[in-house]
Image (tube, rainbow, N blue to C red):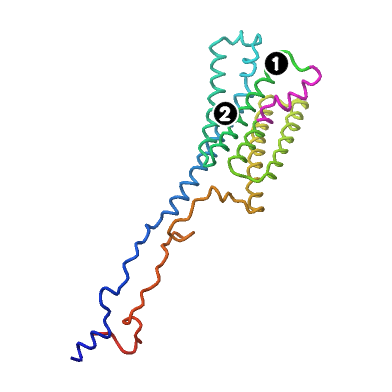
Amino acid sequence: MLRDMSYSENTVPPQQYAAPVPRPKLGQPQAAGTAHSNRWLLSLVTTSLGGYLLLSSLSGQVTQVLSGAEYMRELGFSFGLLLTLDLLFALAVVLLGLFFATASLARRGLAAGIVTAAVIVVALFQAVRFSMGFGGATAFVAFTVADPYVMLPLALGAAWLVVRYRPALTFAALVLVIILALVHWALLTFGADSATSSLVMLLLSASVTAAIGWAGVIASRLFGRDRAASAPAPSAAGPYTGQPQQSPPVHTQQNDRPAERGPVI
């Protein structure tokens, strides 16, 4: 009888236990965050590669080909077509890199339009410059809207700020391209050779474009706008650690007993 009463007091019937709580799989938030970061890294690398190809193409012979001058007749149709296809391929690589970003379709389309418009403007102004010139404004045009070392960092920097959801104040960093125009003018004015001028401008253009991008990062952190819309949504797991949320323990008569009474038999 004593044994039966001890069982009835201290042992919880099976139906009083709570149903097991299903736990989410570990690692899901980390996997989503890694995929998000990989998309941005892929976008950055592809856009940078395309920007280099665009800069090399527009600073070469392709604009003279597009001008339809006598230079085109000397090169031949096949070589002119090859240079034009190189330019289109470089533009396609940049657009592909922008569309790899995880921004909205509207932002990616706007960024692609900025880069495409810049390429068209540079090609047209350089073609007119080589064919007929701009009169007294030729020197000014040559180091501004017709200069790929100025227009491409401007366009790529603005496009990157658009797809990265940077604050409006960040776009003030685009004034850094004035440095490129002044340095390019100084190099040609003081008689730097073509190879030296191209190397210096290539490195400086990359540095200015990177500075524009980092200005966006700093401004986002200062103003607390670190792209909350594009961050991966939290799941049922813990918000940052990826650990499952612990369910409250089920209190029974058995585990509430004082420890000094010993185990229930």
C-alpha separation, residue under disc 1 versus residue under disc 2: 22 Å
Determine whether the residue tagged by mark 1 lies in a helix, strand or loop.
Answer: helix
User: Residue 53, which numbered label?
Assistant: 2
Q: Residue at x 60, y 39 (%)?
A: 160
Q: Residue at x 67, y 20 (%)?
A: 124
Whether residue 144 appears in magenta in the rendering, the answer is yes
- First in sequence, mark 1 or 2: give its number: 2
Q: Which residues are magenta?
A: 135-151
Q: Which residue is mark 1?
A: 130
* Depth order, front residue of 98/250: 250
Measured from the top left, where is residue 249 in percent x and y?
38, 73
The answer to whether marks 1 and 2 mark residues whose Cβ atoms lie closer than 8 Å is: no
Identity of the residue furthest to the front in this view: 15
Identity of the residue furthest to the left in this view: 1
Quadrant in the rendering for residue 63: top right
Measured from the top left, where is residue 154 in percent x and y?
67, 34
What amino acid type should be assigned to the residue bearing mark 2? Leu
Decide: is 20 above or below 197.
below
Whether residue 155 appears in magenta in the rendering, the answer is no
Tell whether 26 sits left or right of 174: left
Q: Residue at x 46, y 46 (%)?
A: 35
* Depth order, front residue of 192/92: 92
Crowdedness of circle 2 by 10 Å Cα count: few (<14), some, many (20+)?
many
Q: Residue at x 65, y 46 (%)?
A: 167
